[in-house]
Image (tube, helix red, strand yellow):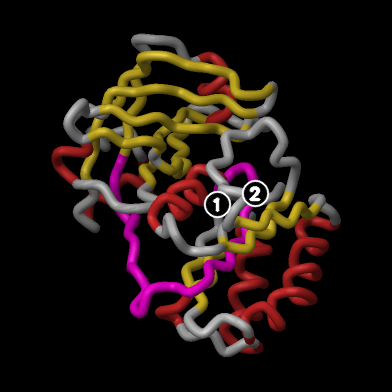
Amino acid sequence: MGQGHGWQGAVLKLMRAKDFVLTVTGAEDVTDDYRRLHLTDGGLLAATGVHPTMWVRLWFENAGKPHQRAYTLVDPDPEAGTFSLEFALHEGCASDWARAAKPGDTIEATVQGTGFQRPRPEPSHVFAIGDPASLPALNSLFQEFAATPATVWFEGEPDGLPSRADASRHEIRRVPRENAGARLAEQVRAELPELLRAAPDPYVWIACDTATTRTLTTYVRKELSVPKDRMHALGYWRAT
């Protein structure tokens, strides 16, 4: 495997990436724009183990060239060797594949770069910034910090999506996507500082489009002085 993955695959191989073949066992349309696929893992979970917000790189063909996109594992079951993946559908080869996927279809996956560093001391409050693309990872975060209150700025429409937020301890602040994410960044800048001051051991988690994630990461680190070990940031998609 990996021979057809181009220079990206070659680089990942040098970084000791591990390759697997996943097989689709079922699919369900959660909404018109959100699709869940169930898969067998081809030995992936037994070989790598599982951690919160774990993701894999899937390989698609895009105009004859290899193209990889990362997706968070949903409900991984190491004993059964299964998990699900959720796709926020839009235009592109990954969404096209997910729309058409049916039982028996296979896709290659690479595990490299995923990780989770648990903050110490434990968070007194989680502050998360995400959107439909990062919802599976956000759900995983909710499960990992099951008793911890959270404030979430969610860009886009959460209605109908499989959120695992608990209204008793998770506050979801809806933010419409406007001006390529500028509205989200503006609202976080206006509301996060005061909330941070009230949290003795905060943890900030940022996972939206790459440009907005970069903007908010710089803001949280440099202007709010949140240390590296009290935050995590990863761009989940690139706006076109």
Using the image, determine if residue 21 lies above or below residue 104: below
Q: Secondary structure at mark 1?
A: loop
Q: Which mark is residue 142?
A: none
Q: Which residue is mark 1?
A: 236
Residue at point 79%, 76% (across, down): 190
Kindly identify the amino acid type of the residue bearing the numbered disc 1. Answer: Tyr
Of the numbered discs 2 and 1, the one sitting upstream in the chain is 2
Which contiguous range is marked in magenta? 110-134
Q: Which residue is mark 2?
A: 131
State yes or no: residue 112 in magenta. Answer: yes
User: Quadrant of residue 195 in the image?
Assistant: bottom right
Kindly identify the amino acid type of the residue bearing the numbered disc 2. Answer: Asp
Between 191 and 15, the residue placed more toward the observer is 191
Q: Disc 2 or disc 1, which is closer to the eye?
A: 2
Contact check, label 2 and label 1, Cβ < 8 Å: yes
Using the image, determine if residue 48 lies above or below residue 128: above
Q: Which x, y percent locates residue 18?
A: 21, 44
Describe residue 110's horizontal placement relative to residue 189 as left or right. left
Residue 77 appears in the figure: yes
Using the image, determine if residue 228 lies above or below residue 157: below
Q: Which quarter shows the N terminus?
A: top left
Between 166 and 118, the residue placed more toward the observer is 166
Q: Which x, y percent locates residue 150?
A: 57, 62
